[in-house]
Structure formats: structure tokens, C-alpha cells
Amino acid sequence: MPRRVLAGLAREFPQGRVLWRMLWPVPLLLALPLILLLASALAEDTAAIRDAGAALARGNLDQAVALYSQALQDKTLANERRAILLSDRGVAHARLQNPREAIEDFNRAVQLFPEYAAIYNNRGNVLLGIGAVREAMKDFDRALLLAPGYAAAYSNRAGAQVRLGEVDLAVADYTKAISLVPTSPAALTGRGRAHLAARRPQTAIRDLTRAINLDARFSAAYRARAEAKMVAAHYDEAIEDFSDFDKLGQGFTSANPLEKVDIGDGLVPRPTFVNANLLNDCKADLIKLLKEYIDCFA
């Protein structure tokens, strides 16, 4: 099956864009059966399935869950297609902050289509979000065993490794993700945060600057670079990055868990958030600097 055919499949099938990155350049004899299964599933798409995918893409999550549930009532669906729909509904549940329902959908999907790496990656993200870090690691490992070119799974496993304090392993996984998708700012931002957690602020700043150069609206990179510049004592530049982050406003999602801290004077609370994965002494230094320059963040 030539590359242009695979690329066409990726354009037609929403999960195919992920699949394309996962499978190429996995040896064709291994990739072909899974690709053919997914290609055959395209023929089963109904209006409800297409509408569900569109609702998920638009962020209309309640509508997406309802439409996926409607589509899943079709008893003629092949196991592989049903698994993909369950996985997509699980993603919608996860975004709705319904981890129990999401994990139930992913568990059912795995039973129906155990060869599909995206299910393990999705379930791993939810497990990571509820603090089950080692269980999440098992899912990311499984996803990468099935699809060695799955950039998102490398980034997600790296995030789990940072949570476990395995920063050097995290940097290696982020580096692999960057090599697979060099134009995406997410892995660069993640690697920058990992370097910051290891008290390497200058190296972090380099990665985060590269991420911003790739996407000037990627707000997570500005926030992370501001933290790194504070640690590096580049205070004026840090203030500029905090300001840019603030201007970008909504749509920010942290690449790492955040910890709420109070930088007020003890009388009037002034809550803000810092990277929870920073080493304790690094975190203490950052909080001290935030308190010292509190008027800059009014």
C-alpha cells in the first residue's frame, strides 16, 4: 500500500491522522492488517458517527457523548469500529471530567480491539490525570510496543516519568517525540518543563523558545518559559512572558500538574499556580521571587 494511499486514509478517518504517525515507518507487513481493518471500518460510518466526530472536534462534548451512544446502539458494528467509537466517547468523557466513565469506555474498547494503540494512550492520559501514574506508565508502554512511532505516547509517558522523578528518562522520551513530530510545540514545551524540574533553566528556556517560535499562540510555552526565566533571574523577561501568557488567556492547559500557592502578604490572599513537578528547593525559590515581584502580576 503506497504512502499516498495511507495519507488519504489519514485525511478521511479522524483517528487516521494519529494512526499515520503511529504506523509509519513500522514495517508494512505489521502495519497492513491494522490499516485494512480501519479502512474497512470507514464504510460503516453513519450520519450519527460523522456528527459525533464533528461534535467532539468542535468541543461540544455532551452532544458528542449522546451521538456516540446513539451510534453504539447499532448491533451490526464490527468489533474494531465499536472499539474506536468507545475510545472516542471515552475521550469526550475525559474532557468532561468524567474519568470513571472514560476508563469504562477504554476498558471495553481494549477488549474489542487490543491491537489499537490509541486506546492505551487515551486510557493512560486519564489514569495520569487521577494520579495513577504507574498504571498510566503501563498503558503508555503498551501503546509504544504496538506503535513504536507514536509521538503522543512518548510525550505522555515522559509526563508520567517527570511525575515519578525520572527526569532524564522523561527528557529522552520527549526528545524521541520531537524527532517524530519536529513541528509540534507540545513536546518541546514538555522537555523544557522537564529541564526546569531538574534545575536546568537555561536549557529549558532554549526548548521553550523553540516551541514559541513554532507556534506563537501556544500559551503553555510562555508560562513555562516565564517560570524558567524567574529561576534564571531574568526577571524583566519573565514578566514579559507572564504578560504574553495572560494576553493569550483562555485555552491554556498546563503540560504538567499545577500546584496552587499563595503569594500574598498573609493578610490578603493572592493565589497563583506553579509547576507541581518542580523540585522543592526550586519551587521555594520561584515562590519567593513571585512574592518579591507580586506587583508585576496584579
Image (spheres, helix red, strand yellow):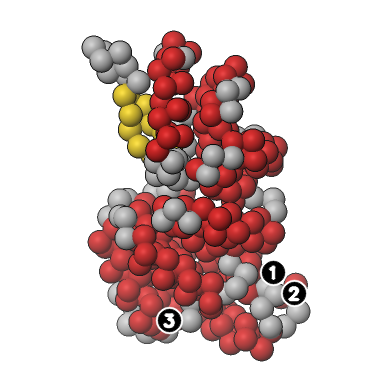
Q: Which mark is residue 7?
A: 1
The answer to whether mark 2 and mark 1 are in CB contact below 8 A is yes
**Residue situated in front as seen by the camera: 8 or 154:** 154
Alpha-carbon span between mark 2 and mark 1: 6 Å
The answer to whether mark 2 and mark 3 are in CB contact below 8 A is no
**Residue situated in front as seen by the camera: 196 or 90:** 196
Q: Residue at x 45, y 28 (%)?
A: 286
Label 2 sits on residue: 3
Alpha-carbon span between mark 1 and mark 3: 22 Å
Asked whether residue 212 appears in the rendered view, the answer is: no
Residue 243 lies left or right of residue 178; in this view the side is left
- Amino acid type indicated by mark 2: Arg
- Amino acid type indicated by mark 3: Phe
Q: Residue at x 42, y 22 (%)?
A: 288
Which quadrant is home to the C terminus?
top left
Q: Quadrant of residue 210?
A: top right
Q: Which mark is residue 273?
A: none
Q: Residue at x 50, y 43 (%)?
A: 197
- Amino acid type indicated by mark 1: Ala
Going from N to C along the chain, the mark reached first, 2 or 3, is: 2
Residue 188 lies left or right of residue 59; in this view the side is right
Alpha-carbon span between mark 2 and mark 3: 24 Å
Going from N to C along the chain, the mark reached first, 1 or 3, is: 1
The answer to whether mark 1 and mark 3 are in CB contact below 8 A is no
Q: Residue at x 39, y 49 (%)?
A: 60
Label 3 sits on residue: 113
Q: Position of residue 159 (x, y in %)?
A: 47, 54
Which quadrant is home to the N terminus?
bottom right
